[in-house]
Amino acid sequence: MPNKPTAATIHTELQVHIKENEERWKTNFKQLDKLEEQIARLQWWIIGGVSSIGISLFTLILTFLIRMNY
C-alpha cells in the first residue's frame, strides 16, 4: 500500500509548483511584450502602405482630371 502524502510533502510540492509557474509566467509575459512590439511595428508599416496607396491614387486621379480639362 502506497504511503499517504503528508502535509509537509504536499507543501514542498506546492512550493516547487509555484516556483515553476512563476518562471513560466515571466517567460510568457516576455514573449507577449515582444509580440506587442512586433504588432505595433506592423501597424505602422500598414499605415504607411495605405497612406502611400492613397497618395498615389489621389495623384493619379488629379493628373487624370487635369489632362481631361486640356
Image (cartoon, grey):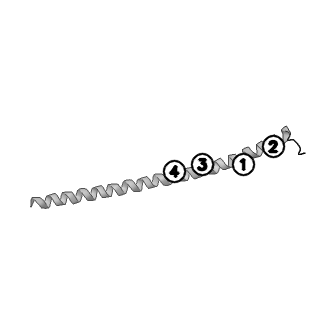
Callout 2, which amino acid?
A: Thr
Name the spot of residue 12 as percent of width and height, x first: 81, 43
Earlier sequence position, callout 3 versus callout 4: 3
In this view, the residue in front, 54 or 4, is 4
Three-letter code for the amino acid on which mark 4 is drawn = Glu
Quadrant location, the N terminus: top right
Q: CA distance from mark 3 to mark 4?
A: 10 Å
> What separation in Å lies between label 2 and label 1 (alpha carbons)?
12 Å
Give the CA separation, mark 4 to mark 1: 24 Å
- On screen, residue 49 versus residue 7, left or right, reads left
Label located before the other in sequence (3 or 1): 1
Please name the residue that numbered disc 4 is placed on: 36
Which one is earlier in the sequence, the residue at label 3 or at label 2? 2
Q: Which residue is mark 2?
A: 12
Helix, strand, or loop for circle 4?
helix
- CB atoms at circles 4 and 2 under 8 Å apart? no
x then y, percent, for residue 3:
89, 44
